[in-house]
Each structure stands twice: as C-alpha cells, then as structure tokens.
Amino acid sequence: IANGGNHSWNMVKIDGQYYHVDTTWDDPVPNKPGSVHYNYFLKNTKQLKVDHQWDENAYPVATSSKFNYFHNMTNMVEKDGMYYYSDSKDNLLYKMDKKTLKKTKVLGDKAPYFAIQGQWIYYSNYSNGGYLYKVKLNGKEKKQINSIHSEVVFIKDNILYYQNTKLKKNLKLVL
C-alpha cells in the first residue's frame, strides 16, 4: 500500500544486500521522455516505510544505505565514467565520478531538464527563463540557443527535442 492505495514494487539483492525499487514512483507523470527520477531507487526498509506499507514479516529487511547518493539525482545521464545529473534539492547540474563518488558542480545554473550529445550538455536554464543553452561537459563555453521556455529536453538520432511550454508544442533542432 502506498498513499492509501494498492501498489507494488520490487526488491532486489545486490552484493548480498536487499533494496527496494519502485520504478512506478520514479517515472514522472505526465510522462516526459528521457526523464527519470531516482527517489525510490535502491532504498532501504526504513526509507521506504515513510510512504509505503507492506507485511514486513513476509519479506527480507533491507538495511544498506550504500546507494543513497542516487536519491537526489534527477534526469541522470551516465557518460565516460561519470554520472551527470540535476540535483533534486537545488536543480543545479552536477557530475559524480562513478568510482570515487566525488561530486562536482558543473555549473551554477538551475538545469532540471538536460541531455548530452558528444562533449555538449544541452539544458533548460531555469536561472534564465528556462531558455535552452549548451555547455561543454567541463562547464565551459556556455551559449544560449533559444529564447523560448523549454522543457522535456532529450536527444534522439542527433536531433535535440524540447517542449515549448507556453505553446505546448514540441520543437526540434538538428545537432
């Protein structure tokens, strides 16, 4: 049971430890292509009990907090040994080394929607009207691309797709 209604999720076992995974609650509604959250990814029992209920005696207890760093990631993209993500607390764009888990801020713009192509990050800059920008993976060479409030940013077949929220229209830009 979750939020008072019937609901189900999964338990997984990684390196001998159990974790809860609720992919339904990590899929934004309405659907936004390329957007996934990690709030309910590899949670322990204590964390999941905040808003989920179940017959705890019928399932293993999940105690590990090893993967808690995922819980603040929104729209994460893995590239070249790094996790690039918008932090759910401040919406700033960060990167995290997969091996060391060292977190570094890429830039100080709020970037809730972004995609990566080659060495460029394309993002909706909520620090400047939600306009579309691009910046190198190292946070340098920032450039504004449009003057339209843009959301739901994703790339497919070298085409950048984004949504003009004012017109509720999907637009694209060939890269």
Image (cartoon, rainbow, N blue to C red):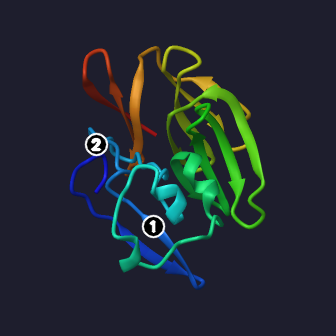
Q: Nearer the viewer, mark 2 or mark 1?
A: 1
Q: Where 151 falls versus 46 (above or below)?
A: above
Q: Where 62 falls versus 86 (above or below)?
A: below
In this picture, residue 63 sits left or right of residue 161: right
Q: Where 25 falls versus 100 (above or below)?
A: above
- Kindly report the distance in space between the C-alpha atoms of the residues bearing marks 2 and 1: 22 Å
Residue at left offset 33%, top offset 45%: 33
The single residue placed furthest to the bottom in the displayed view is 16
Where residue 78 appears, x then y in whole percent?
Answer: 57, 58
In this picture, residue 134 sits left or right of residue 59: right
Residue 90 seen in this snapshot: yes
Residue beneath disc 1: 20
Residue beneath disc 2: 31
Sequence-earlier tag: 2 or 1: 1
| Quarter containing the N terminus | bottom left
Residue at left offset 30%, top offset 15%: 166
Q: Nearer the viewer, residue 99 or 13?
A: 13
Residue at left offset 34%, top offset 70%: 55
